[in-house]
Image (cartoon, rainbow, N blue to C red):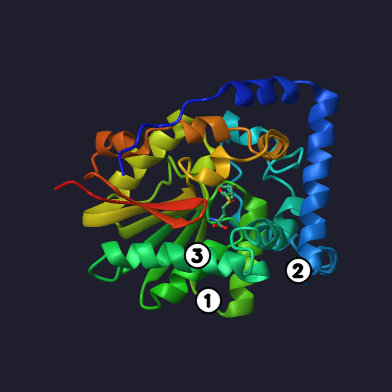
Amino acid sequence: MTAATPSIGLASRFVNILLGIKPLYNLAKYRARKMMIDRAESLGVPWRDRVRELSTYEWDSRFEAICDPNLAYPQYYLKPFHAYEEGNLSWQCAWEVEPASYAVHSGIWPEAGAQGDTRLRQCYHDALKQQLSVPPQDILDLGCSVGMSTFALQELYPQARVTGIDLSPYFLAVAQYNSEQRHAAVTWKHAAAEATGLPDASFDLVSACLLFHELPQDAAKAIFTEAKRLLRPGGHFAVMDMNPRSQVYAQMPPYILTLLKSTEPYLDKYFTLDIEQALIDAGFERPTITPTTPRHRAVVARVAS
Ligand SMILES: C[S@@+](CC[C@H](N)C(=O)[O-])C[C@H]1O[C@@H](n2cnc3c(N)ncnc32)[C@H](O)[C@@H]1O
């Protein structure tokens, strides 16, 4: 797909000005959060009960085991995300991320409800299987969060060794707890996706689910370069994320867009990134871009020979 990259329209500029006014930003943030919790619970996802339960567990030892105290967080990561003042760096956010995913993805297909998240990942994997003729032996999941995308990849390729990387030690502590519950052998690492510290040519598949809409463009491009370094010859880099060319976003009412932007600081940057060209510049073949849901796409690129 090579349609022109969309530019920022007048309505979007106006929304950005509104979000610069603190009381309006706070109101939008509060509304977005309340809508999400109500939506999850109406679908049978026990948001508040689950968070209460997780809050009673012992987290300090898992946090200390995973956290790299010398890691310098990139400035862009220290912004508020998803209506959390501390962004991705808090326990509350780490405990809520799974029910939040069910709530957000329940809206993709009207009939799917809480199964929307699972279906979203299946659609991504269908696109992935179309492009990968040989099952990967070593997989890296960038921006793995609490492990939802990582476990899904592990189920798709059960023979593979799987590693998950994230910048949030809170998320990784919950990922570690989740893998203990599942008896899943995943290696978790606290690092930036643009500087993983992992050896050259050590993976057959580097995957990033729902990571890139959280990044400014220079970070996205640095991650493409790092993925190229990490892949073996013939290896694949795959991105599943929002589809900027989806009609869902083009036709979204401005007040919903306001709510969305109040929780996603780099959405405009992501929507205007020419991902195809940026991947080619980083040393990949021209990627295949497949719409996988009414509002998501899979971008799969093979290392250029
Ligand atoms: C929306 S979540 C996606 C989680 C997961 N992949 C999924 O599909 O459910 C994005 C994740 O990327 C992480 N992240 C953002 N920037 C990152 C970076 N530069 N390096 C590593 N992780 C990053 C965040 O901490 C967060 O866990």
Q: Nearer the viewer, mark 1 or mark 3?
A: 3
Between marks 1 and 2, how big is the CA–CA gap?
A: 28 Å
Q: Position of residue 268 (x, y in %)?
A: 55, 30
Q: Earlier in the sequence, mark 2 or mark 3?
A: 2
Q: Residue 85 occupies which quadrant of the picture? A: top right
66 left or right of 95?
A: left
Vertical relation: 77 (above or below) 1: above
Secondary structure state at the residue bearing disc 1 = loop
Which residue is label 2 attached to? Answer: 43
Q: Name the amino acid type tagged 3.
A: Arg
Which residue is label 3 attached to? Answer: 121
64 left or right of 83?
A: left
Q: Position of residue 165 (x, y in %)?
A: 50, 53
Between marks 1 and 3, how big is the CA–CA gap?
A: 18 Å
Q: Report if the CB atoms under discs 1 and 3 are less than 8 Å apart.
A: no
Mark 1, other Cα within 10 Å: few <14 / some 14–19 / many ≥20:
some
Q: Give the tally of numbered discs.
A: 3
The residue under the point 44% across, 36% down is 220
The residue under the point 61% across, 51% down is 67
Is label 2 within 8 A of ligand 1 (CB to nearest ligand atom)? no
Q: Report if the CB atoms under discs 1 and 2 are less than 8 Å apart.
A: no
Is label 1 within 8 A of ligand 1 (CB to nearest ligand atom)? no
Which residue is label 1 attached to? Answer: 184
Quarter placement of the N terminus: top left
Q: Nearer the viewer, mark 1 or mark 2?
A: 2
Nearer the observer, 109 or 168: 109
Q: Report if the CB atoms under discs 2 and 3 are less than 8 Å apart.
A: no
Q: Earlier in the sequence, mark 1 or mark 2?
A: 2
Mark 2, other Cα within 10 Å: few <14 / some 14–19 / many ≥20:
some
